[in-house]
Image (tube, rainbow, N blue to C red):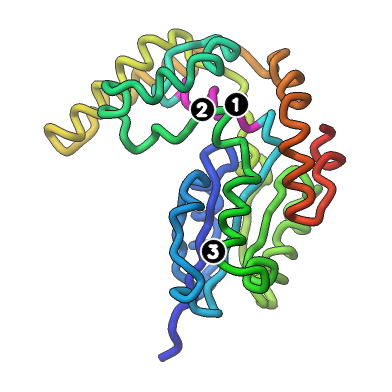
């Protein structure tokens, strides 16, 4: 019996990693799909432990936008209570590495808006562990902002996976997450998330009425589609993007308008 290929996907909620992995699983690729937070790239095994059939996919998007979108996602899901992007960005190190917060939200403490946007260091680590040959042959860097259509995106996947057809139906907006609202009251959302987390630990389930209130809080939320700080981040991240362009041999400054 032919062994199933393994596909390792790296990204964050802001790159739509959950939706992307669902797409791959539905596409019937005869492959096992594994997803990891992009900050975990440095934890992968050494090259000698990999088989030639294993593939890696890294989801990338404009780092300034992904920082902003990740903040909105974390607000909506109740992992963040500071509803001012500038203040949240300034306080993220203190907040996410505080003992109580880390204990309660151990699974998400790496979701830092600035830190997880610094792709280059993580990707360099991946190259060092895989070796140059495997890095350029078996790793696909999907720059989400580069694709103009779903068809173009699917063709890229087909080429990388050496498949004639990938049965994938989705919208690019499923991957480049762009929330238009933040919760009506982010502090209430934060408290409700804490209740959910404690319920999972103590009782093994999430109370439905708590999730309903959280969804309602988001539905009645405040519109916020842009923030001036995103433009500043484009400037602040320019050196990072130039370095990443050099690693990937692709001019990301033009794609991301940085």
Q: Are marks 3 and 1 in contact (CB under 8 Å)?
A: no
Which residue is the extreme one toward the bottom? 1
Nearest to viewer (mark 2 / mark 3): 3
Nearest to viewer (mark 3 / mark 1): 3
Residue appearing at x 51%, y 66% in the figure: 7
Q: Is residue 224 left or right of residue 194?
A: right
Quadrant where the N terminus sits is bottom left
Category of crowding for the residue at label 1, using alpha-carbon neighbours closer than 10 angstroms: few (below 14), some (14–19), many (at least 20): some
Relative to 90, say whether 65 is above or below: below
What span is in magenta?
A: 66-76
The residue that label 2 is drawn on is 73
The residue that label 3 is drawn on is 129
Image coordinates of residue 90 in percent, x first then y, are 55, 14
Q: Secondary structure at mark 3?
A: helix
Mark 1 to mark 2 CA distance (whole Å): 7 Å
Residue appearing at x 47%, y 67% in the figure: 46
Which residue is the extreme one toward the front? 128
Mark 3 to mark 1 CA distance (whole Å): 35 Å
Q: Nearer the viewer, residue 173 or 243?
A: 243
Of marks 3 and 1, which one's residue comes earlier in the chain?
3
Image coordinates of residue 151 in percent, x first then y, are 76, 58
Image coordinates of residue 190 in percent, x first then y, are 36, 17
Asked if the stretch drawn in magenta spans residue 27, the answer is no
Residue appearing at x 44%, y 68% in the figure: 32
Of marks 2 and 3, which one's residue comes earlier in the chain?
2
The residue that label 1 is drawn on is 179
Category of crowding for the residue at label 3, using alpha-carbon neighbours closer than 10 angstroms: few (below 14), some (14–19), many (at least 20): some
């Amino acid at each position: 019996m032919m062994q199933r290929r393994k596909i390792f996907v790296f990204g964050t909620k802001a790159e739509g990693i959950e939706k992307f992995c669902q797409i791959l699983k539905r596409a019937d690729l005869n492959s096992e799909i594994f997803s990891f937070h992009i900050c975990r790239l440095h934890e992968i095994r050494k090259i000698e432990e990999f088989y030639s059939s294993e593939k890696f996919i890294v989801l990338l998007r404009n780092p300034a936008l992904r920082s902003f979108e990740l903040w909105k996602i974390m607000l909506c899901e109740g992992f963040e209570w500071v509803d001012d992007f500038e203040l949240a960005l300034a306080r993220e190190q203190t907040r996410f590495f505080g003992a109580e917060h880390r204990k309660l939200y151990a699974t998400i403490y790496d979701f830092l808006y600035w830190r997880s946007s610094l792709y280059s260091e993580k990707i360099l680590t991946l190259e060092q562990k895989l070796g140059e040959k495997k890095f350029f042959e078996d790793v696909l860097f999907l720059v989400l902002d580069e694709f103009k259509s779903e068809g173009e995106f699917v063709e890229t996947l087909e080429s990388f996976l050496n498949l004639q057809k990938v049965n994938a139906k989705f919208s690019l907006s499923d991957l480049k997450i762009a929330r238009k609202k933040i919760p009506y009251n982010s502090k209430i959302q934060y408290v409700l998330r804490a209740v959910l987390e404690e319920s999972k630990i103590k009782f093994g389930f999430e109370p439905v009425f708590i999730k309903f209130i959280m969804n309602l809080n988001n539905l009645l939320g405040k519109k916020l589609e842009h923030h001036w700080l995103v433009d500043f981040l484009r400037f602040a991240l320019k050196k990072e993007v130039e370095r990443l362009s050099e690693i990937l041999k692709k001019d990301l400054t033009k794609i991301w308008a940085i």
